[in-house]
Structures are given as structure tokens and as C-alpha cells.
Image (tube, grey):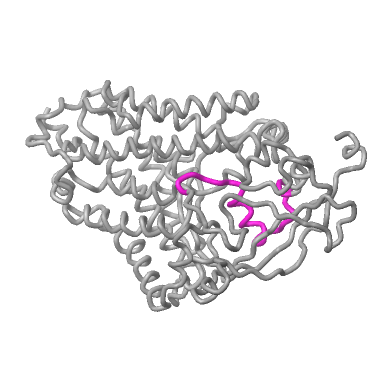
Amino acid sequence: MDWVSWFEAPDYEFARQVLQRGTAALYFIAFLSSLNQFPALLGEHGLLPVPRYVDGHGVLRRPSLFRWRYSDTLLRAVCAAGLAVSLTLVGGLPQLGPPWLPLAAFLALWLLYMSIVNVGQTFYGFGWEMLLLEMGFTVGFLGSDQVPPPRTILVLLVWLLFRLEFGAGMIKIHGGSEWRDLTALYYHHETQPMPGPLSRQAHLLPKAMHRMEVLGNHFAQLVVPFFLFAPQPLATIAAGIVVFTQLWLVGSGNFAWLNWSAIVLAFAAVSDPVAHAVLPFIPQRTNPAAAVPQTPMLWLAVVLAVTVLLLVLSYWPIRNLLSRGQLMNASFNRWQLVNTYGAFGTVTRHLVEIVVEGTQADVPVDEADWREYGFKGKPGDVRRLPRQWAPYHLRLDWLMWFLPLRTVHEEWFYAFLGKLLDADPPTLRLLRQDPFDGDRPRWVRARSFLYRFATRAEFRETGQRWIRMELYEVIAPLSLPKQRRRGH
């Protein structure tokens, strides 16, 4: 029927492919990250065990398969199912069937990963978790190759990207003065949670370049998002600017899948004709309206009902965006849909890192042979070139960055030190280097250091990429009770 043609967007097929396959790829990485890290961090014998967390809360207010029973075996089964479903969507197999098939697959990913996030406690307290959940739910309603992409869902995905970008821009304007006086990037590349291989080079750029970076960031986050709703080709140009700025962030840091999520979402504003004009290898249908059947009435009704639901839920993030007390990375409902986003409202001026050491000496004096544990992502070895980990998420390393900003006396951190004293194999696998090769240390301690990037002259002279200065001992030497040492 011609009256439903307003609902159909046949010239956004390339956008649908990128949105669905890209989101599925990010889910694959998220489930892989959980499979590798969740048992050691939150499992039955983890740092913050889920069974204890669930028992302490009685009935969880947010939905999770683990609210009734948790086991590491069940967690691995959930991750394996998520990995399998994600792979089929990346390969485009469910998209070959009726529109209900990819919808069911994405809803399965959404529910499975939400089950993990809702018991993940502080290790899953990052904005990109709820972002991935919202993306997974929404892109499912783009349907399959047998129906045209629904225009209302594409608009809602643009609205999600708008909240992500504009929310991040507004949180900076409301936040530290360094964003308003254009000095934020004097510090950010150096003090971010997990620098990448190019972060030092970005930090060493002239300060005039850093001020231009901040101006460019404000333009990309406070002005460009409005043009995502403009007619073509303006919307695609705006999307291109978002992609370019996000790629710069990908190259200069490690922010899990946050930047890649924004890149994927940007394609909701990219039409097939404009994409083909920029990248001629992208196929273009000569008559897109005739290439796929019309939308079935039942599918139309379902998509419109979800559209109304998400529009109603938009009231709370809109109110938050306009508030002087803007919340950052907050959800307003138990299903984590239509959230508010934002990051780095303030930038730390100095990088303080917690260094964990152990010794097998009988007496933990300073002169003992203290050996440093090596982490995979966070700064440690002053000569080591930081690695590119994103979009993979190293949860332990990220939380180590927050310790000096909050307090080192976190429950999970003391549990972590206890696992090191036990030489717990799952915990040691989270690290890059165990200085005792699987043996138990007799003592462990934590010290704080001030880190900064070496200048080019310092690097040529010393070979060090970091210069660090000891501040103080934050946790004095700890050991296991004597009976446990004898039991070993």
C-alpha cells in the first residue's frame, strides 16, 4: 500500500547492514570479554562473587538470568550462546529470513548480556554497557532483508547517537573549566585510564594543536549532532564528521567499544546514494523501492508500537540533557532503554597509578626483593609501549585507574591482593606478568606513583616512555595467616 511508503526507507539498506552486523560484532567482543574475565572477577570464587551479591540483595530489581541461580558453568553457557548468536548476525544469516528472525536474535543478545551486566557490580559500571544494550534492542527492529528498513527505527538510532554525542558535549560544558578554557587536552592523552600506542605522540603535540582538538570536539559534539537529522547529503556529512572524530579517539586511547559504537551508529544517517558516491564499491540498487516487498502490516504495527514506547521513554533523557545537574551515564528504567550518556566531564591533571608488588622475603622491609606485577593495559613498566586493546575491554585495568580517584580501600582490591597471595591461577591470568611464575609471594603491598609521558629528549636518553615518581605506600605489606601458609 502506498500509504505506508513514508515508513519505508529502501535507500538505507547499506546503513541497516552496518548497524546490525556492527552491533553484533560488538556483542561478540563483549561476550568474549565476559567469558575471559567474569569468572575471575565475579564468579563463584571471584573478587566480588555474584552468589553473595544476589543473596545480599534478596531479589534483584533488574532482570537477570542469575537472579535465581548463578554458577560459573551457567555464565560460560550464556557467553557461549551470545558468541554463537552474534556470529550468525555478523554473517548475516538471520537477516536472510523473515523480519522476526533477526529481531529474535538481537533480543536474545540483549537479554543475555543484560543478565551479565545486572550482576556485574562495579566491574560492569561503565556507560558503554548500557549503550550496547540499547543498541542491541533497537537495531533488532530494523528487520531483515525481506522488508525495507523502517524509517522510524533509523531515526531512533540517530536519536541514540545524538544523545551519546550531545550528552558528552554538554557534560563537558557543565563540567571542568579545562573544557571551557580549551586546555583539557593538555592533560587528557596522558592521564586517560588506558593510553594506547599513539597516546604519547598525541600528548606531545603542540599546545595550539590541543586547543584546536578541544574546539573540534565541541563542534563535533555540540553542533554536528543536530545535522544528523538534516536532509541528505547533510546528514551523511554530519555522520562522516562523527566517524572521523571517533577514529581519532580510537587511535589515541582505549575506551572499550564506546567509540566503535558511535561509529556504527553514525551509519544510521548515511543513505545508499551518498555512500555509493563516496565509496563507489558499495552496491546501489537502481530502484530500491522495487527491490524488496512492502512491509507486512503486523510488522508495521510492532515497529510503530516500539517506536512509540521509545519516544515516551525519551522524556527522561531529554529532561536530563536540559538540566543544570545533568547526570552522566544513567538509566531511567530497569530495562536500560533510552539512557543518558556522557563521559569525561572533568579531566584529571595528573596520572597517579597504583603499583602492586610482592616479595617472598620473610620480613617485608624496603630492602627486600620486591617484584612488580605487570598489568595488560594500564601503565606500569616505564619502557613498555602501551598496547591497543579497544574494543576489547580490560575491566581490572580500568578499575585500577579509578582507585586513586576514589579510595584504594575498595573491597574488590583487598580481595585481589588476597588472590595474589594465594597465587590464584584465574586471577593471575588477568595479568600480563606474574613475577613469581605461579609461586606464592609471602607479602604483597601497594604503592602509588605519579606518571607522566617522557619528552622526546628523555626518551632518546633513557628509552623510557614514562617517567614516574614514587608518592607513598597506600597499603602496607599484607600476608596470609600462618596456618594458610603452612597448608600450602
Who's the residue at 37% across and 65% down the image? 217
| Residue 3 pos. (x, y %) | 13, 32
Who's the residue at 49% across and 49% down the image? 389
Q: Is residue 46 magenta?
A: no
Q: Nearer the viewer, residue 454 or 160?
A: 454
| Residue 219 pos. (x, y %) | 33, 66
Q: Where does the magenta region start and end?
A: 390-413
Image side of residue 111 versus residue 428, left or right: left
Q: Quadrant of the N terminus?
A: top left
Who's the residue at 16% across and 32% down the image? 4
| Residue 48 pos. (x, y %) | 69, 40
Q: Nearer the viewer, residue 316 or 402?
A: 402
Image side of residue 420 versus residue 17, left or right: right
Above or below residue 304? Residue 69 is above
Who's the residue at 50% across and 29% down the image? 112
| Residue 474 pos. (x, y %) | 76, 61
Q: Quadrant of the C terminus?
A: top right
Above or below residue 488? Residue 451 is below
